[in-house]
Image (cartoon, helix red, strand yellow):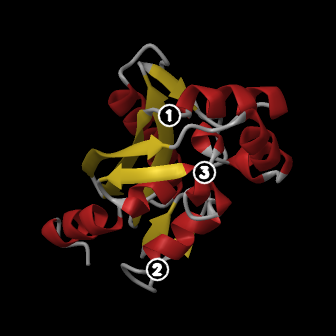
């Protein structure tokens, strides 16, 4: 059995593009990693902790953990704590290019595959009114970097370089190929 160790409805939807034969068992442990690590290593560590937590309970199954962060100028942006934090993040991203990193960890028996995918995202210059309106929508609060590209956050984005699905939370094509290469599909 394949287990996706995530409570994210977006990841569930995206993983169903790879296979319909999987279960959702979210990791419930505290997300912990060393924030002084480079963003790529940090997000992989988060994904690995999720996968390890569930793999310990289901050692015979294939477990996939994933996590997504936004990084700009070395600063890691997770989910905003409150409205002020969301506005701060959006002002920081306004008119710039940033990176979205998704770390993925696949554990099957004693085998572990860990990788990170990066997508560059460019934002339009945002007015205070746009930031206030987007924040008031409530959309930023459960998303890394305070925006969701698949929702009205798309109006903030002037372009991307890389995998669109990675920005949503799962690099579908790369994960599919990693699972094929490992003989897990």
Q: Nearer the viewer, residue 26 or 157?
A: 157
Decide which of 96, 185 is in the foreground and name it: 96
Q: What residue is disc 1 on? A: 95
Q: Nearer the viewer, mark 3 or mark 2?
A: 2
Q: Residues within 10 Å of mark 3 (few under 14, many from 20)?
A: many
3 or 2: tag closer to the N-terminus: 2
Label 3 or label 1, whichever lies nearer to me, is 1
Residue 80 placement: quadrant: top right
Q: How many marks?
A: 3
**Residue holding disc 2:** 16
Give how far apart the Cα atoms at labels 3 and 2 are. 19 Å
Q: Position of residue 100 (x, y in %)?
A: 42, 42
Q: Is residue 50 above or below residue 59?
A: above
Residue 31 is tagged as none
Marks 3 and 1 sit apart, C-alpha to C-alpha, by 35 Å
Q: Residue at x 77, y 31 (%)?
A: 81
Q: Nearer the viewer, mark 2 or mark 1?
A: 1
74 lies left or right of 179: right
Q: Residue furthest left?
A: 181
Q: Is residue 59 left or right of residue 24?
A: left
The x, y position of residue 27, in whole percent, is: 60, 51
Question: In which quadrant is the C terminus drawn?
Answer: bottom left
Q: Is disc 2 in contact with disc 1, using a CB cutoff of under 8 Å?
A: no
Q: Determine the secondary structure under disc 3.
A: loop
> x and y percent of residue 64 in the render?
42, 58
The residue that label 3 is drawn on is 27
């Amino acid at each position: 059995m394949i287990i996706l160790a995530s409570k994210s409805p977006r990841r569930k939807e995206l993983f169903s593009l790879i296979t319909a034969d999987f279960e959702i068992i979210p990791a419930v442990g505290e997300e912990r990693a060393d924030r002084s690590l480079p963003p790529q290593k940090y997000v992989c560590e988060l994904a690995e902790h999720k996968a390890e937590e569930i793999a310990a309970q289901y050692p015979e199954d294939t477990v996939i953990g994933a996590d997504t962060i936004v990084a700009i100028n070395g600063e890691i942006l997770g989910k905003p704590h409150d409205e002020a934090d969301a506005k701060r993040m959006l002002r920081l991203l306004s008119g710039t290019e940033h990176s979205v990193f998704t770390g993925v960890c696949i554990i099957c028996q004693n085998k572990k595959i860990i990788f990170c995918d990066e997508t560059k995202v460019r934002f339009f210059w945002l007015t205070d009114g746009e930031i206030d309106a987007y924040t008031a929508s409530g959309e930023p609060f459960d998303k890394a970097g305070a925006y969701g590209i698949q929702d009205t956050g798309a109006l903030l984005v002037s372009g991307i370089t890389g995998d669109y699905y990675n920005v949503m939370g799962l690099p579908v094509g790369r994960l599919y190929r990693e699972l094929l290469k490992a003989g897990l599909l």
